[in-house]
Image: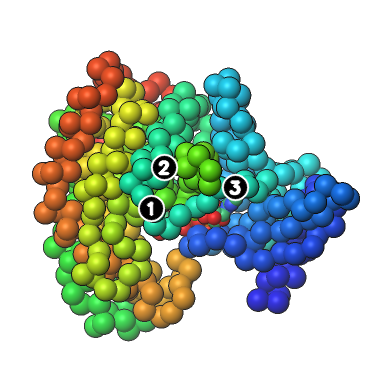
Amino acid sequence: MDERKKAAENAAAHFDFEGTMREIAPFGNGHINETWLACFEIGLMGPLYVILQKINTAVFREPERLMANIEGVTGWLRKKIIGEGGDPERETLTLIPAKDGKSFYRDDAGQYWRAYRFITDATCYDKAESAEDFRQSAVAFGQFQRRLADYPADSLYESIPGFHDTAARLEVFRKAVSEDVCGRKAEAEKEIDFVLAHADLAGCYRRAAAASPLPLRVTHNDTKLNNVMIDNKTHRGICVIDLDTVMPGLVMNDFGDSIRFGASTALEDEQDLSRVSCSLDLFTAYTEGFIQECASRLTNAEISLLADGALVMTYECGMRFLTDFLQGDTYFRTACPEHNLVRARNQFKLVSDMEEKLPRMRQIVARAAESAEPAKSAEMPETAGPQKRISQA
Ligand code: ADP
Ligand code: GN1
Ligand code: MG
């Protein structure tokens, strides 16, 4: 920890802050980047907080292009928010430049760092405290989707190619099982069988796209509840964070990943599986919030697949945890050797529960869409780049 802290302190000194750094400490519950909260004191102004992140370059291979994405997207959102009369300092991330004017600092060890203004009086929750808070997170992600609908998607670098290509991830999983590099396969027999028995989920969108094309849009791709900040006073979802995976993608995945994480009755690594299920109350709250905010821009084919998206994302995430377990925990941050296996079991319990509830989930979506704005355009976005429609899943 000391070495890591020293590296963070050194990085902090290379950003364009005023004042004296009083404290720096690890922050948040993200699985990928290393996040620090730094406190500066500026004369008589009192403390100023800053988020400092070391970008995980094993996951994000081209951090400079990644940062160009984030500069582009946050700049775009800023203009939209100002145009809508909002507060850009609280409603989108604000990058603090490095002393050389770049949006990142590369240290002598070749590690990449970035800094954001800390958004005060707001919280990222690992679990929804109420259905209303969860609805608010849906409004925030729906707004995010709407504000980026006309973003020049061609300019976005694909920070993780094939990020939600579930079929490709299934192939990687099969390889991990056959190679069994850590000798962990025997411990995970039941879970491996689960993935293989549900392989048809990986082709869900490809089958649907054969009947009606599915547009690629600018999506967030990591829409966990703890990637949205909820205002402590108003309880409104104010700011979508963690923009590393903003890329062209499918709206069902953004919807589905939120449900996977936030509509579960337990945390993602709860070991007592009797506590893990998909709450239909939470599902309804999220669906209503999301549909109210952005469904008028979605096609009927997309809307009819939103509930399925929850199953696909939960299956894919469980498979990714299990793949990482088999490969020796090289991707997700883990707190113990079983962590990824526990997470995978948890996700598969959720998949089984969602399978049972899928007809009701589809009904809830259909009902929310009926009572939302009637004008549902079947238009494909013109901004989604050369591959405007999904032909593979
Ligand atoms: P990861 O990719 O590891 O999930 P995130 O970008 O989501 O990293 O950041 C991790 C945590 O740090 C978030 O869940 C949130 O609690 C906190 N955080 C990140 N950016 C900010 C910010 N600008 N203001 C306040 N908190 C933040
Ligand atoms: C990671 O970065 P974080 O913690 O918000 C992961 C997501 C997974 C999630 C599972 C870039 O999200 O894809 O769904 O963990 N992010 C990346 O909790 O792989
Ligand atoms: Mg995060």
Q: Classify mark 1: residues with Cα within 10 Å, few (<14), some (14-19) or many (20+).
A: many
| Depth order, front residue of 124/155 | 124
* Residue at (52, 51) in percent of width and height: 123
Check if mark 2's residue and mark 3's residue have beta carbons within 8 Å. no
Residue 385 shown left or right of residue 80 in the figure: left
Q: For the residues marked 3 and 1, what is the alpha-carbon distance in whole angstroms?
A: 17 Å
Q: Is residue 391 above or below residue 313?
A: above
* Ligand 1 under 8 Å from disc 3 Cβ: no
Query: Could one spot residue 145 in this view of the protein?
Result: yes
Query: Could one spot residue 13 in this view of the protein?
Result: no
Indicate the amino acid at tag 3: Asp
Q: Quadrant of residue 299?
A: top left
Residue picked out by circle 1: 128
Give the tally of numbered discs.
3
Residue picked out by circle 2: 137
Where residue 59 sits: x, y (%)?
51, 58
Residue picked out by circle 3: 121
- N-term-proximal mark, 3 vs 1: 3
| Depth order, front residue of 47/199 | 47
